[in-house]
Amino acid sequence: MIHLDIQNQKTSFSPGETIAAKITWQLEKSVNAIELRLFWHTNGKGTQDINIVNTLRFTQPPQRDTRPFQFQLPSSPYSFSGKLISLIWAIEAVTDPLDEAGRQEFILSPTGREILLCDTFPANPVNG
Amino acid sequence: MFLFFGVFLGLGLILTCPFLIHPLWKQRAAQDWPRMPCTIVSSEVKRHSGGDSTTYGIHIVYRYHFNNRMFQSDRYDFITGSSSGFKSKKMAVDAHPPGSQRVCYVNPVNPSEAVLRRDLHAGYLAGIIPVVFTVVGAAGLFVVRRNKLNVGAGGSNKIFGLGAPPNPGSLPPHSALPAILAPKNSPLKKFIFFFVFAVIWNIVIFIFASQLLQGWQKGAVDWSLALFFIPFFLAGIVLPGIAFYHLLALANPRPRLGVSSQCVPLGGSFTLRWEFSGRTSRIRRLHIRLAGQEEATYQRGTSTITDKAIFATLNIFDTTNPLEMTSGQATVVVPSSSMHSFASSNNKIVWFIQLHGEINWWPDIKEEFEIVVLPLEAAQ
Amino acid sequence: MRARDNPFASNLISRLRCHFPPSHSWDSLLLRLQRLEYRGAITGPMGSGKTTILEELAVRLEKQGRQTRLAGLTIQHRQIPDPGHFFANLESTILILDGAEQLNWLSWQRFLRQSRHAAGLIITTHQPGRLPTLFTCATTPALLDNLLTQLHIPPGSPLRLQARRLFDLHCGNLREVLRSLYDSCSTLPHPL
């Protein structure tokens, strides 16, 4: 079992903010390492894109433990959803060799909410 | 595609010499050859069967004297090879019955060479076919090479001269400098594409059509094949029409767009200036807007498809007054609550300026100019 | 509906598992592959699930302790990416090629020559003939129903009826059916 807890149950972060969390694991057998990944991926109609932004590695971990960690978030891309594409940020922990994994999604956005793409913008030009 | 157009060009170049240049050169040279009487020995239309098709050639053997020596030749004119079309050849043969006296033209330098017909006639037009191959091959190679160079220079971001994003999801390097925007697809590019496509398509269709026609002449029509090819024939009619449409569009007034900054942050603003060269009085309505678009790419069987969906549109300028169309400027505010430009391998958010000029009874002006919208943090 | 909520998003489609007709199973497929000395082709028309079977087959072979090396060809990319690596040290590796129909006769002969030392060669192709046929993919309404169940589309949902119509419209091309269903769902205001 691997469990990820973001501090204060926070689900939304501003660009450039630091995400603080803790990882708790209880493994049935020992593993070489546990790797933490900060990444985003797309979902939707197009082929999925995944980009790992940062990683953290605990080598030769005990079979059960709890450890805090933090990642500095980049300024972009924002979490967004449209008809064809959603961009989802997450932190993930995986064992090496891959046996167990845990994952926690969050939102990266200056507004605190996922950017929803919809055709609602008014016409507001300023003609010169 | 390089190989495809390369084969076209190679075949065209190889065949142009024997089918066009050499016959025309000999025909010109024969104008100075002396006239000599000749006797027709034999005359017939020769059939050449190859696969399903039959071609015909004029075969007339004649004897003539030159410098007290007798020669024999079977050259009717300087056209190389045989072709379809029986009637015209039969008429030529009938006009030269065996035993009749006629006139031939003899090469004084090489008297064994002579010709019965030295005028320039419609049969020489067949030599233009390899030239079409050459032009299509060369144009195709040019377009393919230019597209490859463009991709190498950074694909869709090349209008900013900035190169491709270095990492998935990252933004192109940005500059706050003013810039002239280049359209995503120029009218000339569109015309060349459809013209080349229509020529290639119709050459292939012509080959199939001539096969079907020959079958029809023989009274053995493959109706299932004919029905199968009907949509392809119809496309062969429509494609030149599309090419012609884009040819007409080349005569449209050409817009030039400039922006005060190459990249603009969410919530930020930029000044857009435009001017037209050409007669703007023909434009009935000019509509400029900013649009945000999702682009998702996926595999469909063996081809790659990109689906697009516009998620934001922002009117910038809309007028029916011709005086306001020639040139103008507007300040554009990018919505702060929207999504910045984004590009990963298969998914993109693209912002662009759409310019639409409606013209009565003529192709409209429709051009798109990409801009980069930055995230708030990156802009700050 | 947001792209992330769409039940036909590409990441969910790529997780769909193969569903064999009653006469076939993974065991029978692996046994046949063994009898063919690990050289065989999965054939079938576009969108009939060849790639899905191939990918799952690769996982199962890896689980058996066999090394596999996979490459995919498309109309845009008709050459093996990084051939130096793909054809290196083949003695204990089973080569897996998705989209072998993209290779013309000459390229296919060259591919066969370069892969002759491999421990196996499995391909997908539209037409049989290049290698002994390992399995022929065919699409049926029952297979479509199974996929919809895997995608958690409830029985009796209007999407199922629409899927049946699309199945006929796209001549059994399941990939096209699922993509059309994606478009239908993307216009819905809320998740299912």
Image: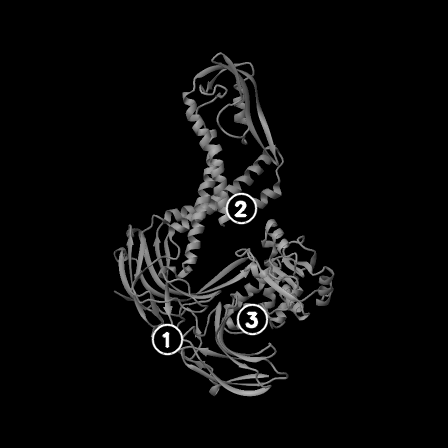
Give the label, 3 or 1, closer to the camera: 1
Q: What residue did someone put label 2 on?
A: B232
Q: What residue did someone put label 1 on?
A: B377
The residues tagged by marks 2 and 3 sit, at their Cα atoms, a distance apart of 38 Å
Give neighbour class at mark 2: few <14, some 14-19, many 20+ (Cα, 10 Å). some
- Amino acid type, mark 3: Pro
Comparing C86 with B166, the one in front is C86
Q: Which mark is residue B129?
A: none
- Residue B105 in the image: state x and y as whole percent: 46, 19
Q: What residue did someone put label 3 on?
A: C7
Q: Is residue C48 visible?
A: no
Q: Residue furthest top?
A: B68
- Residue C122 in the image: state x and y as whole percent: 65, 60
- Amino acid type, mark 1: Glu
Closer to the chain start, of discs 2 and 1, is 2
Asked which secondary structure carries label 3, the reply is loop
Give the label, 2 or 1, closer to the camera: 1
The residue marked by circle 2 belongs to what chain? B
Q: Is residue A25 above or below residue C35?
A: below
- Residue B33 in the image: state x and y as whole percent: 43, 20
Q: Is residue B10 above or below residue C7?
A: above
Quarter of the rendering containing residue B55: top right
Asked which secondary structure carries label 2, the reply is helix
Residue drawn 58% across and 35% down? B214
Asked whether the residues under the numbered discs 3 and 1 touch, taking CB atoms below 8 Å apart as contact, a structural biologist would say no
Comparing C45 with B132, the one in front is B132
Q: Are marks 2 and 1 on the same chain?
A: yes
The residue marked by circle 3 belongs to what chain? C
The residues tagged by marks 2 and 1 sit, at their Cα atoms, a distance apart of 53 Å
Asked which secondary structure carries label 1, the reply is helix
Q: Is residue A91 above or below residue C78?
A: below
The residue marked by circle 1 belongs to what chain? B
